[in-house]
Amino acid sequence: MSRPVLQVVVASTRPGRRGLAVASWVQRLAQAHGAFDVELVDLAEVGLPLFDEPHHPRARRYVHQHTRDWSATVDRADAFVFVTPEYNHSFPASLKNALDHLSAEWADKAAALVTYGGVSAGLRASVALKPVLGALRVHTVPEAISVPFFTRFLGQDGEFVPDTEIEVAAKAVFDELARVTPALRTLRAGS
């Protein structure tokens, strides 16, 4: 059996965002972990419009090419790491829109959350995101990475350079995703 595909999803799409630096770091660590084939999925590059399909996503009767392309991207994943900032005590609309475009493609896959922000470390984004993922039957692992005052971890070149505690949290995230993803893959194969 091939290695599972882990998609690192960059939730922020705004100009000047810093999430891409955090996601690139997550991608490098996931690749070094060795349990996954890792893909970076940048919602800014995906470029989905506001949800515009005439049929409910559960029907998988997509009329727009952008939705069919997005469906194929998400379908090939076995697990996700959502890298998200906190916007007004929640997660970005770009991520909600991307989630809402699909249904079955998300189901019975593992996910971990990487949040970043100021004093709250993006934790309120995590609190808001978990029930949405649950409704899509995404299994969120309890291990997570929450980065407070994340700008202090940005080098002069804009690269994300975390401290040891954040690195340790990342290893725990990848270990847990590697543990549960094969079981969910088997579950999906039996569906």
Image (cartoon, helix red, strand yellow):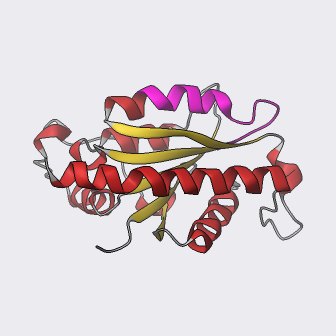
**Percent x, y of residue 157:** 84, 71
Where 144 sits versus 2, above or below?
above
Instruction: Work out whether residue 172 or residue 102 is closer to the camera in this orientation and state it.
Output: 172
**Location of residue 156 (image quadrant):** bottom right
Q: Does the segment drawn in magenta span residue 184?
A: no
Q: Is residue 165 visible?
A: yes
Quadrant holding the N terminus: bottom left
Q: Is residue 79 left or right of residue 59?
A: right
Q: Is residue 179 left or right of residue 143?
A: left
In the rendered view, would you say 180 is above or below 121? below
Q: Residue at x 80, y 39 (%)?
A: 148
Q: Is residue 19 visible?
A: no
Q: How many marks?
A: 0
Relative image position of residue 115 (x, y in whole percent): 65, 42
Closer to the camera in the image, 108 or 44: 108
Residue 181 position within the rendered picture, expressed as x and y whole percent measured from the top left: 39, 54
Residue range highlighted in magenta = 115-131
Occupied quadrant, residue 27 = bottom right
Q: Quadrant of residue 132?
A: top left
Question: Residue at 38% across / 71% down in the picture?
Answer: 3
Q: Position of residue 146 (x, y in %)?
A: 70, 41
Q: Give the residue drawn at x 20%, y 42%.
A: 53
**Which residue: 63% across, 33% down?**
87
